Amino acid sequence: MQQHLQAIVTVLSLVNPLICGAMFAQIEAGQARTTQFGDAIKAALAVLVILVIAALVGARVLQVFGVSLDAFSVAGGGVLAWIGFTMLRGDSAPVPATKNQKRSLTPVILFAARVTALVAVAVATVVMWIMMLLVGREATHEGGGFLHDTATRFMGLIVIAMGTQFALTGLDNFFAAHS
């Protein structure tokens, strides 16, 4: 259960449903509610497909390139920390959806148990879809508003911590295996 919860929190932090909802509200401003609903379903399905593919074949792709999960954990941790610092800095420029989708691939590959990864992906996708439908008018203000900025900075800190943990775990596993 702890592993499932950790996986869900990790994927939720990286998908960042609140920010996805805020970006969605900005993009869909002025659209009919039925159009917004359909677009939210399409976006959630696209993210779901990308994350499921990463969860199912990510480790095999790493094997093809001769990259160990430990090395990927260290590199992915560095990338996550960099992304987290960018978020923590509070850049208010909207992030295109494709960057959020790419950002979400890194930790999913790290989960050894595919079922855990798939549960986390499903939960994160549903939460993201709900947030796209619920995040309201506050997100449409210039720069995303207080909620957007606060959530981005908080999630940045969480992403930095996750990146650091991934890197340290990868280093620890690597040195344990080679000593």
Image (cartoon, grey):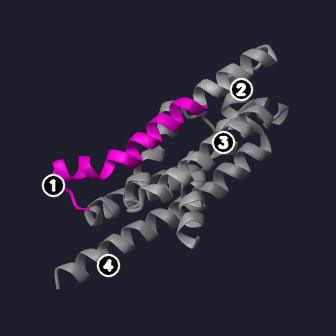
Q: Is residue 45 magenta?
A: yes
Mark toward the viewer: 3 or 4? 3
Tell me which label, 3 or 1, sits earlier in the chain: 1
**Pointer 4: residues within 10 angstroms few (<14), some, or many (20+)?**
few
**Which residue corresponds to the image point at 52% horizontal and 37% vertical from the top-left?**
48
Mark 1 = which residue? 66
Numbered circle sitting on residue 126: 3
Q: Earlier in the sequence, mark 2 or mark 1?
A: 2
- Horizontal side, residue 52 vs residue 142: left or right: left
Q: Disc 2 versus disc 1: distance between alpha carbons?
A: 42 Å
Say which amino acid is labelled 3: Val
Q: How many marks?
A: 4
Which residue has dot 4 on it? 172
- Span highlighted in magenta in the image: 44-68
The mark nearer the N terminus, 3 or 4, is: 3
Q: Earlier in the sequence, mark 3 or mark 2?
A: 2
Mark in front: 4 vs 2: 4
- Mark sitting on residue 26: 2
Q: Are marks 3 and 4 in contact (CB under 8 Å)?
A: no
Q: Residues within 10 Å of mark 3 (few under 14, many from 20)?
A: some
Under mark 2, the amino acid is Gln
The answer to whether mark 3 and mark 1 are in CB contact below 8 A is no
